[in-house]
Amino acid sequence: MNGLRAVIVCLVIACAAVVSPAAAVTRGWSALPVPAAAPPVAVSDLAARGPGEAWATGYEHTPDELRPVLYRWDGTVWSRDTTFPGAGEPGRLGKVRFVGEEMWVFRNSAGTGEILRRSAGGWSTVPLPQTLWTYQDFAAVPGAAWVVGEDDTGLKVLHHDGSGWTTQSTPDGVLYVMGISARTADDAWAWADTSAGTAVLRWNGTAWRDAKVPLPPNGNVHTILLEPSGRVTIGGSRYTDGVTRTYLMTWNGAAWRTTYPPLGDTYTEAMVRGPDGALWLPVRSDRAFRSKYARVALDGLRTTFSYGPERTNAIDVKPRALARAGSSLLSFGTVEIYGSKPNLMSERLGG
Protein backbone atom coordinates (compact mmCIF):
# COMPACT_ATOMS: atom_id res chain seq x y z
CA MET A 1 0.00 0.00 0.00
CA ASN A 2 2.80 2.41 0.83
CA GLY A 3 4.37 1.67 -2.55
CA LEU A 4 1.10 2.44 -4.35
CA ARG A 5 0.71 5.68 -2.38
CA ALA A 6 4.22 6.72 -3.39
CA VAL A 7 3.47 6.05 -7.06
CA ILE A 8 0.30 8.18 -6.89
CA VAL A 9 2.15 11.04 -5.19
CA CYS A 10 4.82 10.94 -7.88
CA LEU A 11 2.20 11.02 -10.63
CA VAL A 12 0.52 14.06 -9.05
CA ILE A 13 3.85 15.89 -8.83
CA ALA A 14 4.69 15.00 -12.41
CA CYS A 15 1.33 16.29 -13.67
CA ALA A 16 1.77 19.55 -11.77
CA ALA A 17 5.20 20.00 -13.29
CA VAL A 18 3.94 19.88 -16.87
CA VAL A 19 1.06 22.35 -16.48
CA SER A 20 1.40 24.83 -19.34
CA PRO A 21 1.74 28.60 -18.82
CA ALA A 22 -1.65 29.04 -20.49
CA ALA A 23 -3.29 26.79 -17.93
CA ALA A 24 -1.61 28.69 -15.10
CA VAL A 25 -3.68 31.78 -15.96
CA THR A 26 -6.77 30.20 -14.38
CA ARG A 27 -5.44 30.43 -10.81
CA GLY A 28 -7.70 33.29 -9.75
CA TRP A 29 -8.22 37.02 -9.97
CA SER A 30 -6.33 39.35 -7.63
CA ALA A 31 -6.83 43.05 -6.95
CA LEU A 32 -4.24 45.60 -8.10
CA PRO A 33 -4.07 49.02 -6.39
CA VAL A 34 -4.72 52.02 -8.67
CA PRO A 35 -3.98 55.64 -7.69
CA ALA A 36 -7.30 57.43 -7.23
CA ALA A 37 -8.70 60.07 -9.57
CA ALA A 38 -11.38 62.71 -8.98
CA PRO A 39 -14.63 60.73 -8.76
CA PRO A 40 -16.79 59.78 -10.48
CA VAL A 41 -14.30 58.36 -13.00
CA ALA A 42 -15.04 56.87 -16.42
CA VAL A 43 -12.78 54.27 -18.09
CA SER A 44 -12.39 54.30 -21.88
CA ASP A 45 -9.84 51.67 -22.87
CA LEU A 46 -6.99 49.37 -21.88
CA ALA A 47 -4.20 47.94 -24.05
CA ALA A 48 -1.10 45.91 -23.22
CA ARG A 49 2.09 45.31 -25.21
CA GLY A 50 3.26 42.49 -22.95
CA PRO A 51 3.56 41.62 -19.27
CA GLY A 52 5.56 44.78 -18.51
CA GLU A 53 3.59 47.51 -20.27
CA ALA A 54 -0.08 48.42 -20.36
CA TRP A 55 -1.97 51.70 -20.60
CA ALA A 56 -5.48 52.61 -19.46
CA THR A 57 -7.41 55.73 -20.44
CA GLY A 58 -10.49 57.64 -19.35
CA TYR A 59 -11.52 60.87 -17.68
CA GLU A 60 -12.30 62.23 -14.24
CA HIS A 61 -14.84 64.78 -13.04
CA THR A 62 -13.21 67.84 -11.50
CA PRO A 63 -15.49 70.50 -9.93
CA ASP A 64 -15.71 72.47 -13.19
CA GLU A 65 -14.97 70.10 -16.08
CA LEU A 66 -13.87 66.70 -17.34
CA ARG A 67 -10.14 66.00 -17.28
CA PRO A 68 -8.30 63.22 -19.13
CA VAL A 69 -6.65 60.43 -17.12
CA LEU A 70 -3.88 58.09 -18.24
CA TYR A 71 -2.45 55.19 -16.25
CA ARG A 72 0.54 52.97 -16.94
CA TRP A 73 1.22 49.41 -15.79
CA ASP A 74 4.93 48.52 -15.58
CA GLY A 75 4.47 44.85 -14.73
CA THR A 76 4.37 45.52 -10.99
CA VAL A 77 2.24 48.60 -10.20
CA TRP A 78 -0.15 51.07 -11.76
CA SER A 79 0.93 54.72 -11.82
CA ARG A 80 -0.72 57.84 -13.18
CA ASP A 81 0.96 59.58 -16.11
CA THR A 82 0.57 63.36 -16.28
CA THR A 83 3.33 64.07 -18.80
CA PHE A 84 1.22 63.95 -21.97
CA PRO A 85 0.30 67.17 -23.81
CA GLY A 86 -2.79 68.80 -22.32
CA ALA A 87 -2.84 66.61 -19.21
CA GLY A 88 -4.18 69.50 -17.13
CA GLU A 89 -6.66 70.76 -19.72
CA PRO A 90 -10.33 69.85 -20.20
CA GLY A 91 -11.09 66.76 -22.25
CA ARG A 92 -11.01 63.00 -22.20
CA LEU A 93 -8.93 60.16 -23.58
CA GLY A 94 -10.36 57.38 -25.72
CA LYS A 95 -8.90 54.32 -27.39
CA VAL A 96 -5.23 53.42 -26.95
CA ARG A 97 -3.25 51.41 -29.53
CA PHE A 98 0.34 50.25 -29.98
CA VAL A 99 1.79 51.23 -33.35
CA GLY A 100 5.21 49.70 -33.80
CA GLU A 101 7.34 50.98 -30.95
CA GLU A 102 4.94 53.84 -30.23
CA MET A 103 1.77 54.15 -28.18
CA TRP A 104 -1.12 56.17 -29.69
CA VAL A 105 -4.11 57.57 -27.80
CA PHE A 106 -7.13 59.44 -29.14
CA ARG A 107 -7.89 62.66 -27.27
CA ASN A 108 -11.04 64.80 -27.40
CA SER A 109 -10.50 68.26 -25.98
CA ALA A 110 -13.42 70.71 -26.02
CA GLY A 111 -14.71 69.13 -29.23
CA THR A 112 -11.34 69.08 -30.99
CA GLY A 113 -9.85 65.67 -31.74
CA GLU A 114 -6.18 64.74 -31.96
CA ILE A 115 -3.92 61.73 -31.60
CA LEU A 116 -1.28 61.66 -28.88
CA ARG A 117 1.85 59.68 -29.78
CA ARG A 118 4.37 58.44 -27.22
CA SER A 119 7.77 57.19 -28.38
CA ALA A 120 11.19 56.78 -26.83
CA GLY A 121 11.77 60.47 -27.57
CA GLY A 122 8.69 61.66 -25.71
CA TRP A 123 5.23 62.88 -26.66
CA SER A 124 3.99 64.41 -29.91
CA THR A 125 0.55 65.11 -31.40
CA VAL A 126 -1.17 64.44 -34.71
CA PRO A 127 -4.01 66.97 -35.17
CA LEU A 128 -7.05 66.02 -37.23
CA PRO A 129 -7.73 67.89 -40.48
CA GLN A 130 -11.13 69.06 -39.22
CA THR A 131 -13.34 69.22 -36.17
CA LEU A 132 -16.21 66.75 -35.96
CA TRP A 133 -19.46 66.92 -34.06
CA THR A 134 -18.98 63.34 -32.89
CA TYR A 135 -15.83 61.22 -32.64
CA GLN A 136 -17.21 57.71 -32.68
CA ASP A 137 -14.10 55.51 -32.83
CA PHE A 138 -10.38 55.32 -33.57
CA ALA A 139 -8.01 52.65 -34.90
CA ALA A 140 -4.30 52.67 -35.66
CA VAL A 141 -1.71 50.23 -37.06
CA PRO A 142 1.74 50.76 -38.58
CA GLY A 143 1.23 52.91 -41.66
CA ALA A 144 -2.41 53.84 -41.09
CA ALA A 145 -4.91 55.37 -38.68
CA TRP A 146 -8.63 56.02 -38.88
CA VAL A 147 -11.02 58.31 -37.02
CA VAL A 148 -14.73 57.85 -37.69
CA GLY A 149 -17.44 60.28 -36.70
CA GLU A 150 -19.85 62.87 -38.01
CA ASP A 151 -19.97 66.57 -38.88
CA ASP A 152 -22.70 68.85 -40.22
CA THR A 153 -22.51 67.17 -43.63
CA GLY A 154 -22.88 63.63 -42.35
CA LEU A 155 -20.56 60.71 -41.57
CA LYS A 156 -16.81 61.07 -41.90
CA VAL A 157 -14.09 58.42 -42.22
CA LEU A 158 -10.74 60.20 -41.79
CA HIS A 159 -7.68 58.22 -42.87
CA HIS A 160 -4.02 58.92 -42.06
CA ASP A 161 -1.41 57.17 -44.22
CA GLY A 162 1.63 58.16 -42.18
CA SER A 163 2.13 61.50 -43.93
CA GLY A 164 -1.27 63.16 -44.15
CA TRP A 165 -5.05 62.89 -43.90
CA THR A 166 -7.68 62.07 -46.50
CA THR A 167 -11.44 61.52 -46.29
CA GLN A 168 -12.59 58.09 -47.40
CA SER A 169 -15.93 57.32 -48.98
CA THR A 170 -18.18 54.45 -47.89
CA PRO A 171 -20.61 52.28 -49.88
CA ASP A 172 -23.99 53.71 -50.82
CA GLY A 173 -26.59 53.36 -48.10
CA VAL A 174 -24.17 53.74 -45.17
CA LEU A 175 -25.66 56.24 -42.74
CA TYR A 176 -23.29 56.09 -39.79
CA VAL A 177 -20.07 54.26 -38.92
CA MET A 178 -20.30 53.06 -35.32
CA GLY A 179 -16.89 51.45 -34.81
CA ILE A 180 -13.67 50.44 -36.52
CA SER A 181 -10.86 47.93 -36.00
CA ALA A 182 -7.70 47.34 -38.04
CA ARG A 183 -5.23 44.49 -38.46
CA THR A 184 -2.91 46.11 -41.04
CA ALA A 185 -2.89 49.24 -43.19
CA ASP A 186 -4.67 47.23 -45.91
CA ASP A 187 -7.08 45.29 -43.72
CA ALA A 188 -9.55 47.23 -41.59
CA TRP A 189 -13.12 46.39 -40.59
CA ALA A 190 -15.96 48.66 -39.51
CA TRP A 191 -19.56 48.21 -38.45
CA ALA A 192 -22.13 50.64 -39.71
CA ASP A 193 -25.76 51.63 -39.63
CA THR A 194 -27.17 51.42 -43.16
CA SER A 195 -30.51 51.92 -44.83
CA ALA A 196 -30.92 48.11 -44.70
CA GLY A 197 -29.80 47.68 -41.07
CA THR A 198 -26.45 46.93 -39.45
CA ALA A 199 -23.66 45.90 -41.85
CA VAL A 200 -19.96 45.09 -41.66
CA LEU A 201 -17.58 46.95 -43.98
CA ARG A 202 -14.03 46.00 -44.95
CA TRP A 203 -11.12 48.14 -46.20
CA ASN A 204 -8.80 46.31 -48.62
CA GLY A 205 -6.24 49.05 -49.09
CA THR A 206 -8.18 50.64 -51.95
CA ALA A 207 -11.83 51.02 -50.97
CA TRP A 208 -14.44 50.26 -48.33
CA ARG A 209 -16.87 47.52 -49.37
CA ASP A 210 -19.69 45.58 -47.78
CA ALA A 211 -18.09 42.46 -46.28
CA LYS A 212 -21.36 40.53 -46.73
CA VAL A 213 -21.26 39.17 -43.19
CA PRO A 214 -24.46 37.18 -42.45
CA LEU A 215 -25.32 38.92 -39.17
CA PRO A 216 -28.21 37.47 -37.16
CA PRO A 217 -31.60 39.05 -38.00
CA ASN A 218 -32.28 42.14 -35.88
CA GLY A 219 -28.66 41.98 -34.72
CA ASN A 220 -26.22 44.76 -34.01
CA VAL A 221 -22.43 44.78 -33.55
CA HIS A 222 -20.49 45.82 -30.45
CA THR A 223 -16.95 44.96 -31.52
CA ILE A 224 -14.82 43.19 -34.14
CA LEU A 225 -11.75 41.34 -32.86
CA LEU A 226 -9.06 40.90 -35.54
CA GLU A 227 -6.19 38.50 -34.87
CA PRO A 228 -2.83 38.02 -36.64
CA SER A 229 -3.84 34.47 -37.60
CA GLY A 230 -6.57 35.87 -39.85
CA ARG A 231 -9.36 34.87 -37.49
CA VAL A 232 -12.17 37.41 -37.07
CA THR A 233 -14.59 37.41 -34.13
CA ILE A 234 -17.65 39.64 -34.05
CA GLY A 235 -19.49 40.27 -30.81
CA GLY A 236 -22.96 41.76 -30.72
CA SER A 237 -26.53 41.26 -29.63
CA ARG A 238 -29.82 40.27 -31.21
CA TYR A 239 -33.21 41.55 -30.12
CA THR A 240 -35.98 39.02 -30.51
CA ASP A 241 -39.26 38.30 -28.70
CA GLY A 242 -38.63 41.20 -26.34
CA VAL A 243 -35.27 39.80 -25.16
CA THR A 244 -31.73 40.89 -26.02
CA ARG A 245 -29.33 37.97 -26.49
CA THR A 246 -25.57 38.16 -27.01
CA TYR A 247 -24.06 36.37 -29.99
CA LEU A 248 -20.53 35.66 -31.23
CA MET A 249 -19.55 35.12 -34.87
CA THR A 250 -16.20 33.67 -35.92
CA TRP A 251 -14.59 33.62 -39.37
CA ASN A 252 -12.08 30.78 -39.77
CA GLY A 253 -10.94 31.79 -43.25
CA ALA A 254 -13.64 29.81 -45.03
CA ALA A 255 -16.98 30.34 -43.31
CA TRP A 256 -18.78 32.22 -40.54
CA ARG A 257 -20.00 30.39 -37.46
CA THR A 258 -22.53 31.89 -35.04
CA THR A 259 -22.96 30.84 -31.41
CA TYR A 260 -25.11 32.13 -28.57
CA PRO A 261 -23.18 31.63 -25.31
CA PRO A 262 -25.17 32.04 -22.06
CA LEU A 263 -24.15 35.69 -21.63
CA GLY A 264 -27.57 37.34 -21.49
CA ASP A 265 -27.44 40.89 -22.84
CA THR A 266 -23.71 41.38 -22.17
CA TYR A 267 -22.06 44.21 -24.09
CA THR A 268 -19.04 42.61 -25.79
CA GLU A 269 -16.87 45.66 -26.47
CA ALA A 270 -14.28 44.56 -23.85
CA MET A 271 -13.87 41.05 -25.33
CA VAL A 272 -10.28 39.82 -25.78
CA ARG A 273 -8.49 36.61 -26.71
CA GLY A 274 -6.85 35.31 -23.56
CA PRO A 275 -3.48 33.56 -23.26
CA ASP A 276 -5.34 30.25 -22.95
CA GLY A 277 -6.92 30.69 -26.40
CA ALA A 278 -10.42 31.37 -25.05
CA LEU A 279 -12.43 34.56 -25.34
CA TRP A 280 -12.75 36.55 -22.11
CA LEU A 281 -15.11 39.39 -21.28
CA PRO A 282 -16.58 41.05 -18.19
CA VAL A 283 -20.25 40.41 -17.49
CA ARG A 284 -22.83 41.80 -15.11
CA SER A 285 -22.09 40.37 -11.68
CA ASP A 286 -24.69 38.79 -9.43
CA ARG A 287 -22.56 39.75 -6.43
CA ALA A 288 -22.36 43.47 -5.70
CA PHE A 289 -19.01 43.17 -3.95
CA ARG A 290 -17.22 41.12 -6.65
CA SER A 291 -16.62 41.46 -10.38
CA LYS A 292 -17.53 38.66 -12.76
CA TYR A 293 -15.88 37.42 -15.96
CA ALA A 294 -16.96 34.98 -18.66
CA ARG A 295 -14.64 32.58 -20.47
CA VAL A 296 -15.92 31.29 -23.80
CA ALA A 297 -14.02 28.29 -25.15
CA LEU A 298 -12.50 28.35 -28.62
CA ASP A 299 -15.40 26.35 -30.04
CA GLY A 300 -17.86 28.95 -28.70
CA LEU A 301 -19.97 26.25 -27.06
CA ARG A 302 -18.60 26.08 -23.53
CA THR A 303 -18.83 29.05 -21.16
CA THR A 304 -17.53 29.26 -17.60
CA PHE A 305 -17.50 32.13 -15.12
CA SER A 306 -15.08 33.42 -12.51
CA TYR A 307 -15.20 36.15 -9.88
CA GLY A 308 -12.78 38.82 -8.81
CA PRO A 309 -11.72 39.21 -5.18
CA GLU A 310 -14.22 40.34 -2.60
CA ARG A 311 -14.12 44.09 -1.96
CA THR A 312 -15.27 45.29 1.45
CA ASN A 313 -18.36 47.53 1.33
CA ALA A 314 -18.43 47.52 -2.48
CA ILE A 315 -21.88 48.00 -4.02
CA ASP A 316 -20.87 47.98 -7.70
CA VAL A 317 -17.69 46.53 -9.25
CA LYS A 318 -17.47 47.12 -13.01
CA PRO A 319 -14.47 46.01 -15.07
CA ARG A 320 -14.73 48.10 -18.24
CA ALA A 321 -11.80 46.84 -20.31
CA LEU A 322 -9.65 43.72 -20.60
CA ALA A 323 -6.22 43.12 -22.14
CA ARG A 324 -3.87 40.19 -22.48
CA ALA A 325 -0.53 40.96 -20.82
CA GLY A 326 1.80 38.06 -21.55
CA SER A 327 0.50 34.98 -19.75
CA SER A 328 -1.97 36.99 -17.67
CA LEU A 329 -5.12 39.03 -18.14
CA LEU A 330 -5.52 42.59 -16.88
CA SER A 331 -8.82 44.32 -16.25
CA PHE A 332 -9.43 48.00 -15.60
CA GLY A 333 -12.66 49.62 -14.50
CA THR A 334 -14.48 51.26 -11.63
CA VAL A 335 -15.64 50.28 -8.18
CA GLU A 336 -18.20 52.08 -6.05
CA ILE A 337 -17.74 51.74 -2.30
CA TYR A 338 -20.75 52.41 -0.12
CA GLY A 339 -20.93 56.13 0.69
CA SER A 340 -18.57 57.27 -2.11
CA LYS A 341 -18.59 57.82 -5.87
CA PRO A 342 -17.05 55.34 -8.36
CA ASN A 343 -13.26 55.31 -8.55
CA LEU A 344 -10.73 53.13 -10.32
CA MET A 345 -10.07 49.42 -9.91
CA SER A 346 -7.88 46.85 -11.61
CA GLU A 347 -7.59 43.07 -11.37
CA ARG A 348 -5.24 40.44 -12.75
CA LEU A 349 -5.67 36.80 -13.62
CA GLY A 350 -2.43 34.82 -13.56
CA GLY A 351 0.91 36.58 -13.77
Image: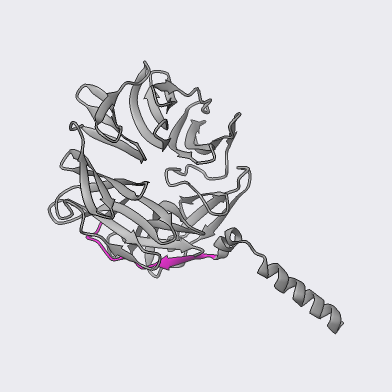
| Residue 114 percent location from the top left of the image | 21, 41
Which span is picked out in magenta? 28-40
- Residue occupying the far bottom of the picture: 2
Q: Is residue 144 left or right of residue 252?
A: left
| Residue 287 percent location from the top left of the image | 47, 60
Query: Which residue occupies 30% across, 59% down?
Result: 71
Please tell me how many numbered marks the rendered image carries.
0
Q: How is the image coloured?
A: one colour
| Residue 170 percent location from the top left of the image | 35, 21
Indicate whether residue 291 is drawn in magenta: no
Q: Is residue 315 left or right of residue 163?
A: right
Prevailing SS of the magenta stretch: loop
Foreground residue, 301 or 104? 104
- Image quadrant assignment for residue 344: bottom left
Query: Which residue occupies 19% across, 24% down?
Result: 152
Q: Quadrant of the N terminus?
A: bottom right
